[in-house]
Image (spheres, grey):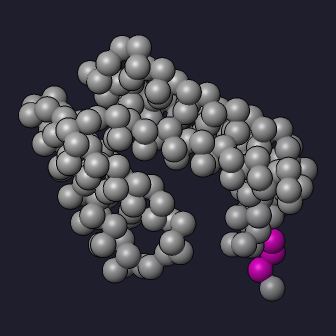
Amino acid sequence: MKQSYDFITLFLFFACYYLYGLMIATGVLVAGTVVTTIVSYAQKPQPLKAYTSPLLIIFLGSLTLLTKNPLFLVWKPTIMYLATSGAVLTGRIFYQTSLIERSLKLVNICVQDYPWKNLDYGLALLFSLLAIANLFVYKTFGLDIWVQYKIYSLLGIMTILMPIFIHIESKVVKHEAS
């Protein structure tokens, strides 16, 4: 349910950006994120790390509103991409395990014979490249093109990740009910 709230908030941001400009769109994004985070927490509290992205949106969006500088908001995806890449690499290098595999095991889903190491390095590379591309597009082409890039890059990321997760799901070992 939280994902649907997030997509509604993003849709409102993009619509407001095209209709009213960045500052109103950022205000809508920050307010929408505050509301969806409160509603999500009220429905089912999560560990603090689950709120990293919304808290970054609220903080960096607020800085954008206060300073009238869009760069703060532009940095949000870059920070999240680098944090994701770093987390995946940390799990692989320091713990010799995949964070995705560990997460699945926490909910009793077993996936055997999967190339976790390749997946981890591939995802770390993908998210590192996305972080670089995010700033490159903004610096090279400006805010309007960056906003369009964000719309299409979100679709692109889902297009890349969906087949991976469908493939992982196909490798799930089914446990017989006792």
Q: Residue at x 42, y 79 (%)?
A: 44
Residue 159 part of the magenta-drawn span: no
| Image location (x, y in percent) of residue 172 | 77, 57
- Left/right of residue 114 with respect to residue 147 in the rendered view: right
Q: Is residue 16 left or right of residue 97?
A: left
Question: In which quadrant is the C terminus drawn?
Answer: bottom right
Please name whichever residue, 21 or 70, is drawn nearer the observer in this view of the structure.
Answer: 70
Residue 1 appears at what percent x and percent y? 38, 64
Q: How many marks?
A: 0
For the stretch drawn in magenta, what is the main secondary structure?
loop
Quadrant of residue 149 within the rendered picture: top left
Residue at x-position 34% and y-position 80%: 42
Q: Residue furthest left?
A: 20
**175 within the magenta span:** yes
Can you tell which quarter of the image residue 69 is in? top left
Inspect this view and state whether residue 75 appears: yes
The residue stretch that appears in magenta: 173-177
**Percent position (x, y) of residue 23?**
16, 40
In the image: residue 82, left or right of residue 139? right
Which residue is located at x 22 percent, y 42 percent? 67
Give the quarter of the image for residue 123. Answer: top right
